[in-house]
Image (tube, rainbow, N blue to C red):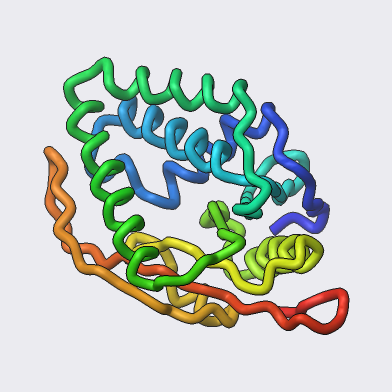
Amino acid sequence: MSEHLILREFQKSDRPALENVVRETWQYDRFCSPKTAAKMARLYLDSCLCNQTFTRVAEADGVPVGIIMGKDIRNHTCPLSLRLSWLYSVIGLLITQEGRKISKVFDCVQDINTELISRCKKDYQGELAFFAISEKCRGKGLGRKLFQSVVDYMHTQKISEFYLFTDTSCNYPFYEHLGMHRCGEKKQVIHTHKEDGNMTFFIYEYQLHTEGKSVSV
């Protein structure tokens, strides 16, 4: 990783680089055409931007290489500009036959997430809405720095507990190393036009200490 690393808020100019990070992280090109994979990455990023109140982008030598988003559920509102961008991305995916088929994967995952959180029977105040790092920058401490920024944000918002959705397509054990607790899971076969895969979806939670001004992970 570059020595010149900064953490800052998300900017519109970050989109192309972060869409590539999303595409790489979730390996969209494995099960659809490059054009559709790019559309999926854009839609996923837009969906996450609609579902956050806090962002931190990791920039190395002027290039975005990672991002984390947190959500204060009590105070979340989505600006019209973000909703319109999300809607544009949805239409862009749905105008092709392949895109319509792939969109069913998004719907399936959303249904699974809804089921997982309903099983917890908790009134969470916060969510870790999105977390991704470029593969070339993993394993060097950047993930912990980004995660700490969300923990600090939740602390300032007086949020004592937040949750995260993830699955076996990601490095989910990393969240356990950060101190998150797995509180639910569901196995599911995901169907695409190129391949079917057995996946397990998880919900993790993190409890903050209520004393002090900072929480280390």
Q: Nearer the viewer, residue 86 or 160?
A: 160
Relative to residue 39, is residue 48 drawn left or right? Answer: right
Q: In the rendered view of the protein, which quadrant contains the N terminus?
A: bottom right
Q: Is residue 88 visible?
A: yes
Residue in the picture at 25% in, 27% down: 99
Q: Is residue 68 visible?
A: no
Q: Residue furthest top?
A: 95
Coordinates of residue 86 in the picture (x, y in percent): 48, 27
Among the 4 quarters of the image, the one containing residue 117: bottom left
4 left or right, relative to 207? right
Could you say where residue 116 lies in the image, as x and y percent from the top left? 33, 65
Residue 157 image position (x, y, % from top left)? 76, 61
Q: Is residue 31 above or below residue 189?
A: above
Q: Residue at the spot x=74%, y=48% of the render?
A: 60
Camera-nearest residue between 23 and 217: 217
Relative to 213, is 192 above or below?
A: above
Give residue 3's position: percent from left, percent from top: 80, 58
In what quadrant of the picture does the C terminus appear? bottom right
Residue at 68% over, 27% down: 13
Question: How many dots with numbers?
Answer: 0
Q: Quadrant of residue 96?
A: top left
Q: Residue at x 60, y 31 (%)?
A: 15
- With 51 as the anchor, is 74 left or right in this view? right
